[in-house]
């Protein structure tokens, strides 16, 4: 399993073709997803699926740009699953892993009706990175925390990173 995570990372870097922003974004989401997943007590199999999904969550961006002229979230969700299928087929993943990773990629920008712990964790990990990369303010971070975040580790990370009042008063 660990070898497939590394192989998926390599394929992701290949597909993003030197786009360091996208590669770094995927790696940061992967790191936060691991931290939250471990805090939530995911078993090894669930964590493995989450690892693959977090690495590949934005893999549809190049195709979305090519097909739709936009990397908007809905186009990422639309194009990403088929790109992930190519990667996971090459890694000889089983149907259940592929189906779950495919679902997570197809719903990582869907914030209503979050249907599983893996979905929740991926959404939270992606938000942590997007809040930083988008230079979003305290009001948006508080809203995301109150309306979307559910895991205790995700809430702790968001609060410490974006809503830490001690940090704010020191600046």
Image: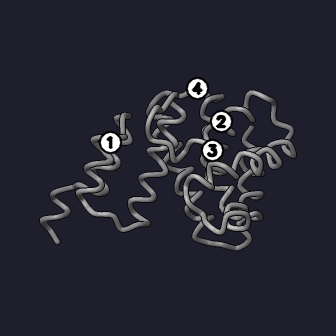
Residue 85 placement (x, y as % from top left): 79, 44
**Secondary structure under the numbered disc 3 in the rendered image:** helix
Label located before the other in sequence (1 or 4): 4
- Residue occupied by mark 2: 49
Secondary structure beneath label 4 = loop
In the picture, the disc for residue 43 is 4
Would residue 132 appear left or right of 82 to someone viewing this image? left
**Residues under labels 4 and 3: Cα distance?**
20 Å
Q: How is the image coloured?
A: one colour
Identify the residue at image location x=65%, y=69%: 69
Q: Residues within 10 Å of mark 2 (few under 14, many from 20)?
A: some
Considering the numbered disc 2 on the image, is that residue within a helix, a strand or a loop?
helix
In the structure shown, which secondary structural element does the residue marked by tag 1 occupy? helix
The residue that disc 3 covers is 105
Task: First in sequence, mark 2 or 1: give its number.
Answer: 2
User: Residue visible at 57% across and 52% down?
Assistant: 74
Distance from disc 3 to disc 1, alpha carbons, whole Å, reads 22 Å
Q: Nearer the viewer, mark 1 or mark 4?
A: 1
Spatial separation of the CA atoms under disc 1 and disc 4 = 21 Å
Q: CA distance from mark 2 to mark 3?
A: 11 Å
Which residue in the structure is indicated by mark 1?
155
Disc 3 crowd rating (10 Å Cα; few below 14, some 14-19, many 20+) is: many
Pick whichever of labels 4 and 3 is earlier in the sequence: 4
Q: Residue at x 54, y 33 (%)?
A: 118
Q: Where in the figure is residue 28, as x and y percent of width and height?
A: 53, 57
Which of the two marks, 4 or 3, is nearer to us in this view? 3
Between circles 2 and 4, the one closer to the viewer is 2
């Amino acid at each position: 399993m660990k070898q497939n995570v590394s192989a998926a990372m390599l394929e992701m870097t290949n597909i993003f073709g030197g786009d360091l922003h996208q590669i770094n974004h995927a790696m940061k989401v992967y790191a936060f997803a691991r931290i939250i997943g471990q805090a939530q007590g995911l078993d090894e199999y669930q964590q493995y699926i989450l690892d693959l999904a977090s690495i590949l969550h934005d893999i549809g961006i190049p195709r979305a740009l090519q097909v739709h002229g936009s990397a908007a979230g809905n186009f990422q969700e639309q194009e990403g699953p088929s790109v992930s299928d190519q990667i996971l087929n090459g890694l000889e993943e089983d149907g259940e892993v592929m189906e779950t990773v495919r679902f997570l990629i197809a719903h990582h920008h869907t914030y209503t009706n979050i249907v599983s712990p893996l979905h929740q964790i991926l959404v939270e990990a992606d938000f942590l990175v997007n809040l930083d990369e988008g230079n979003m303010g305290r009001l948006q971070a508080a809203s995301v925390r109150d309306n979307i975040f559910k895991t205790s580790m995700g809430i702790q990370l968001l609060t410490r990173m974006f809503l830490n009042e001690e940090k704010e008063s020191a600046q």
